[in-house]
Image: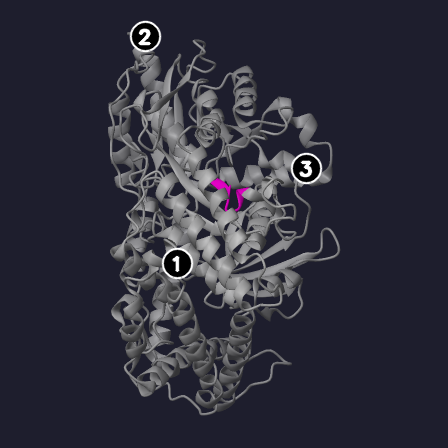
């Protein structure tokens, strides 16, 4: 990270900051003497300044800037329209045609022209949004006929904007009918399940159909109320600026002042009592991240992008939160008592649903760090779990992942393990410095990663310690969510042939570095303005790119594991390569490095492991189930009850098969390290959490397969040493 800081103070970047400061002076002097009561003018000045400063940073500071010209402008306009109306059921086609006159305008506005495009799109959007918000009461007032064979398109890319009001109304009718059909089907299922219960009241079909429509009406009432309250002109302008920033690459983001504060709080781990950060997306409450060690993470049941459908206080009746704002959902999730239960009904991104019970708790710092256990199989295997590449740069006395992993290795060596598995699944990255230090625990001195800034020669980050802490058989587990620092570590181990990488077809593919930069640097300079400068927010800007020591970028391609294991998320399009705005893969000159030579013939182990996976009944089930789920992605949804329930039944069978495939025939024998037992037994809470962790490790089919592969490596290593 020091290299990033150096770049910020380099001769290339200082002029950019000076230009931002001069823009502030110019606009500040230009507006002097004008009435402070002119409330309509102030936002326009602020918006103009934000747009100008964002443009300067993008053009002068971005690692690989696109030219801000008419083509860029056209792409931004389309993206803004998609962000506002992604399902193509608000704007008319004639609106899109009318707004096309701004196709070549946005680049001029970024370069100083008066802002017109945003106001035109936003005004028309709010007008159309108000129109559609009046539709649901009328549509839901009449019963739906679920015997008709009709479909609703689920893939917006296959839709065109409606030509007229009649077409738009029909789009909304089908959407509401599908929502009602889902609830009606649930009611019918509940009636069958509870019909023999003494106190259960049997309701006729027409009553259940009406109640389903009433349920959807309440959902949509909340949904439109939330949108109306949230979609202020400032909020929509932030979306507009983000579409400009994100058109450079997916990781360049604009943070309005309030959003930046929220982002900073999230980085500190303040996540609503259960350790889950939430977002609202199209009226749905979704999980964006989990805090290691907190209840949501400890459960092992929640993942990023899971949708929270209902929230219940213990065994009480759950509240459906579809259409709720994040703030309102958080109020329900939060509790006043530690240990009180909250139950979340979640819908996974593959469509399956589940109720997850959590006990509210405060974060337990010790569980966010590296930890290890012993797995007894054919050989004694050490397992290290690393949730992130953590480090506190402001406080050197705080834990750092490289030092902690080194401690875990020492504990495992004292237990005389025959091999070590390092689990980097769901590890989104972190400290670059610690990646280099940690890789050095497994290799002799040498280069670990190349970091390249714009127009500069790449810098080579090296491990300079000739000692090797662990020389035995080694495997690294990754998946689609292993990103950034995780990919650098896995790539180094693979390039040095130091161990075997095991996981899904590729890691995430984020090979870029960002830095958050304030848009008003003059606020730090009292000579420019004696009053506190207006907070314009910040830009998280992509400044550098990572390259492997073999010369290839980790961007887009990520790391391809040596042994590929079928994964239930494989068919979902959320990796870097699936984003059309992502920076491209490229390669630079490789650096000199010496592959590991302590034992040989890794290729034989890899070949045998891939053959074993291909014939595994469980992984074959997973692979086949994923193919079925993929074929159902973005297909039109039937609005016919019989067909809907047939498809629902088929998908339930697939989900059941997946769950069965993930179950091991025999749970692994997992034990704690002797050195850890004193700390674990300090409190009942720690004992319980440790039991959960040990249980989760022991039941994990992917850890089990990794252990089998490591067993082969151990045999291979012993044979090589004998020869």
Q: Nearer the viewer, mark 1 or mark 2?
A: 1
Q: Is residue 325 above or below residue 111?
A: below
Residue 169, quarter of the rendered image: bottom left
**Which residue bears the numbered disc 3?**
686
Residue, disc 1 = 350
Is the C-beta separation of discs 1 and 2 under 8 Å? no
- Mark 1: few, some, or many residues within 10 Å (few <14, many ≥20)? some
Residue that carries the numbered disc 2 in the rendered image: 722
At x 34%, y 52%, the residue is: 247
From the top left corner, tell me how far across and down residue 386 is, in percent: 51, 33
Q: Between residues 136 and 12, which one lies in front from this camera angle?
A: 12
- Give coordinates of residue 665: x percent, y percent: 42, 43
Q: Are marks 2 and 3 in contact (CB under 8 Å)?
A: no
> What's drawn in magenta, residue-wise?
515-521
Residue positioned most to the right: 337
For the C terminus, the image quarter is top left
| Mark toward the viewer: 2 or 3 | 3
* Nearer mark to the viewer, of 3 and 1: 1
Horizontal and vertical percent position of residue 14: 45, 33
Q: Earlier in the sequence, mark 3 or mark 1?
A: 1
Instruction: Name the residue at 37% across, 40% down.
Output: 60
**Which residue shows up at 42% across the image and 25% down it?**
378
Q: Which mark is residue 39?
A: none
Local secondary structure at mark 2: helix
Q: Is mark 1 on a helix, strand or loop?
A: loop
- Foreground pick, 451 / 157: 451
Q: In this view, does 342 lie above or below 214?
A: above
Q: What is the total number of numbered labels drawn onto the structure image?
A: 3
Foreground pick, 173 / 526: 526
| Separation of residues labelled 1 and 2 (CA atoms) | 49 Å
């Amino acid at each position: 990270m020091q290299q990033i800081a150096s770049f910020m103070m380099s001769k290339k970047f200082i002029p950019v900051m000076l230009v931002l400061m001069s823009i502030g002076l110019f606009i500040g002097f230009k507006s002097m003497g004008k009435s402070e009561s002119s409330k309509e003018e102030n936002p326009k000045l602020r918006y103009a300044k934000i747009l100008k400063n964002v443009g300067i940073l993008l053009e002068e500071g971005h690692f690989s800037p696109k030219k801000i010209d008419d083509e860029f402008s056209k792409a931004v306009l389309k993206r803004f329209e998609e962000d506002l109306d992604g399902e193509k059921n608000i704007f008319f086609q004639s609106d899109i045609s009318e707004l096309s006159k701004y196709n070549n305008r946005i680049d001029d506005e970024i370069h100083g022209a008066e802002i017109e495009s945003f106001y035109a799109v936003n005004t028309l959007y709010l007008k159309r949004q108000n129109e559609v918000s009046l539709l649901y009461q009328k549509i839901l007032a009449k019963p739906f006929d679920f015997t008709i064979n009709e479909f609703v398109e689920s893939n917006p890319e296959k839709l065109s904007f409606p030509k007229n009001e009649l077409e738009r109304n029909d789009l909304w009718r089908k959407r509401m009918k599908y929502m009602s059909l889902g609830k009606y089907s649930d009611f019918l299922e509940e009636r069958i399940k509870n019909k023999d219960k003494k106190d259960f009241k049997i309701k006729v079909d027409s009553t259940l159909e009406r109640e389903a429509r009433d349920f959807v009406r309440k959902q949509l009432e909340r949904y439109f109320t939330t949108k109306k309250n949230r979609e202020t002109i400032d909020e929509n302008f932030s979306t507009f600026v983000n579409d400009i920033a994100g058109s450079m690459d997916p990781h360049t983001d604009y943070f309005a002042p309030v959003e930046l504060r929220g982002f900073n709080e999230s980085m500190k781990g303040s996540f609503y009592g259960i350790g889950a950060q939430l977002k609202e997306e199209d009226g749905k409450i979704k999980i964006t991240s989990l805090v290691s060690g907190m209840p949501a993470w400890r459960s092992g049941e929640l993942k990023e992008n899971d949708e929270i459908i209902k929230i219940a206080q213990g065994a009480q009746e759950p509240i459906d939160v579809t259409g709720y704002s994040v703030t309102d959902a958080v109020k329900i999730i939060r509790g006043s008592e530690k240990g009180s239960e909250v139950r979340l009904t979640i819908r996974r991104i593959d469509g399956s649903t589940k109720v997850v019970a959590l006990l509210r708790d405060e974060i337990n710092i010790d569980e966010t760090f590296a930890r290890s256990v012993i797995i007894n199989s054919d050989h004694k295997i050490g397992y290290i779990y690393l949730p992130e590449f953590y480090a506190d740069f402001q406080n050197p006395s705080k834990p750092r992942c490289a030092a902690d992993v080194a401690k875990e290795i020492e504990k495992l060596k004292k237990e005389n393990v025959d091999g070590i598995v390092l689990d980097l699944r769901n590890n989104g990255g972190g400290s670059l410095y610690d990646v280099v230090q940690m890789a050095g625990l497994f290799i002799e001195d040498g280069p670990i990663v190349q970091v390249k800034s714009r127009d500069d020669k790449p810098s080579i980050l090296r491990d300079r310690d000739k000692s090797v802490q662990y020389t035995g058989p080694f495997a690294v587990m990754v998946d689609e969510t292993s990103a950034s620092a995780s990919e650098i570590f896995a790539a180094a181990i693979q390039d040095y042939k130091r161990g075997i990488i095991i996981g899904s077809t590729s890691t995430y593919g984020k090979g870029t570095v960002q830095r958050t930069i304030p848009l008003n640097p003059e606020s730090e300079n009292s000579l420019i303005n004696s009053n506190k400068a207006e907070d314009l927010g910040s830009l998280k800007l992509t400044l550098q790119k990572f390259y492997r020591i073999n010369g290839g970028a980790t961007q887009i391609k990520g790391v391809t594991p040596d042994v590929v294991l079928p994964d239930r998320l494989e068919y979902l399009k959320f990796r870097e390569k699936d984003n059309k705005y992502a920076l491209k893969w490229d390669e630079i000159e490789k650096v000199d490095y010496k592959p590991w030579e302590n034992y040989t013939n890794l290729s034989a182990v890899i070949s045998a492991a891939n053959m074993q996976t291909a014939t595994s009944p469980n992984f074959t089930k997973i692979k086949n189930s994923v193919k079925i789920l993929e074929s159902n992605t973005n297909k039109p949804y039937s609005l016919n009850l019989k067909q809907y329930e047939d498809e629902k039944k088929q998908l339930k069978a697939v989900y059941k098969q997946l769950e069965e495939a993930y179950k091991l025939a025999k749970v692994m024998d997992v034990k704690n390290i002797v050195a850890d037992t004193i700390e674990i037994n300090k409190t009942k809470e720690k004992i319980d959490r440790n039991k959960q962790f040990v249980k989760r490790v022991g039941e994990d089919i992917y850890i089990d397969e990794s252990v089998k592969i490591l067993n082969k490596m151990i045999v291979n290593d012993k044979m090589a040493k004998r020869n």
